[in-house]
Image (spheres, rainbow, N blue to C red):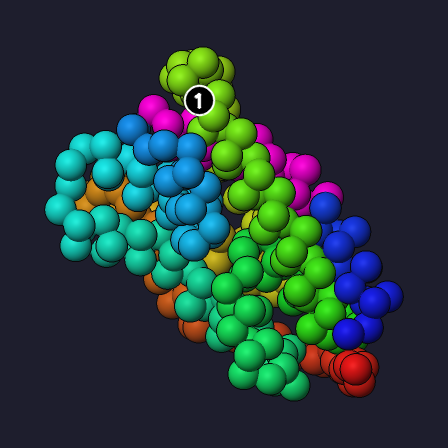
């Protein structure tokens, strides 16, 4: 494995890990508030590893909702990862099947955003860089989830501390990072409107998928960009 690429990925991922730490603590606190033990909260973070979906699942667990509805709700929130995977494929075609397994397991919103920006810039997306970036986010997420669950009962209701505002701010920052791409404003406006209408007429968490679907439709209807596609750098040989 190319150690230089790995270290570069780790450095970039640590910045994201620090910014997402309060969000992980929030999940742990909410999990504890809904009756999960510290070990159960840590296990959920280790296996599900999807912040927004974990919060949705925890809230539904606390309301004694049918298991099939919980699964569908988590799928609705994570629907965007299907789109992420499709958009990322052209940059990781040189990955082996095993590498792709780990690639999609650690795929998160900031991981996707950084990988696409790196690919479009021509630097290429190597597996050492990608897994280094992902590992730097994954393990701190587990640690702070456990910390949040351990101290959750002392914290009380996390909403009283306004920690829940971190989630929309977090996603807003990711969206703004793509503001220079063609069609950004009409797609975002359509997606926001679709999400708001979905929330009022269908309900949560389905409004997430509805907003995404509306944005995809608008993006498909917009004229193609005439800007030349960036040349992706040839992946380095990994040892």
Name the residue carrying label 1. Answer: 152
Q: Which residues lie in the magenta part?
A: 15-33
**Residue 238 falls within the magenta-colored stretch:** no
Q: In this orientation, does residue 62 appear?
A: yes
Which SS does the magenta portion mostly show? helix
Say above or below: 193 vs 108: above
Q: Position of residue 66 (x, y in %)?
A: 13, 46
Q: Position of residue 123 (x, y in %)?
A: 80, 73
Q: What residue is drawn where x is 48% and y is 21%?
A: 151
Say above or below: 103 vs 139: below
**Residue 29 falls within the magenta-colored stretch:** yes
Q: Nearer the viewer, residue 61 or 194?
A: 61
Res 58 → quadrant: top left
Q: Mark 1 packing: few (<14 Cα in 10 Å), some, or many (20+)?
A: many
- Assign the N terminus to one quadrant of the image: bottom right
Q: What residue is drawn where x is 34% and y is 24%?
A: 33
Q: How many marks?
A: 1
Q: Position of residue 201 (x, y in %)?
A: 19, 43
Q: In this orientation, does residue 194 appear?
A: no
């Amino acid at each position: 494995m190319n150690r230089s690429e790995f270290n570069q990925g780790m450095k970039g991922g640590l910045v994201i890990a620090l910014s997402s730490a309060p969000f992980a603590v929030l999940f742990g606190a909410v999990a504890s508030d809904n009756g999960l033990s510290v070990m159960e909260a840590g296990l959920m973070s280790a296996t599900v590893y999807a912040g927004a979906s974990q919060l949705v699942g925890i809230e539904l667990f606390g309301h004694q909702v049918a298991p099939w509805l919980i699964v569908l709700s988590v799928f609705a929130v994570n629907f965007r990862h299907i789109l992420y995977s499709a958009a990322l494929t052209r940059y990781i075609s040189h990955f082996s099947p095993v590498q792709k397994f780990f690639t999609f397991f650690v795929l998160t919103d900031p991981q996707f955003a950084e990988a696409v920006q790196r690919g479009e810039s021509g630097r290429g997306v190597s597996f050492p860089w990608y897994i280094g970036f992902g590992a730097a986010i994954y393990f701190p997420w587990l640690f702070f989830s456990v910390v949040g669950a351990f101290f959750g009962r002392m914290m009380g209701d996390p909403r009283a501390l306004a920690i829940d505002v971190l989630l929309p701010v977090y996603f807003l920052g990711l969206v703004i990072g793509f503001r220079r791409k063609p069609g950004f404003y009409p797609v975002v406006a359509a997606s926001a409107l679709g999400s708001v209408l979905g929330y009022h007429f269908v309900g949560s968490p389905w409004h997430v998928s509805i907003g995404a679907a509306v944005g995809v439709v608008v993006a498909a209807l917009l004229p193609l960009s005439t800007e030349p596609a960036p040349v992706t750098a040839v992946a380095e040989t990994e040892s």
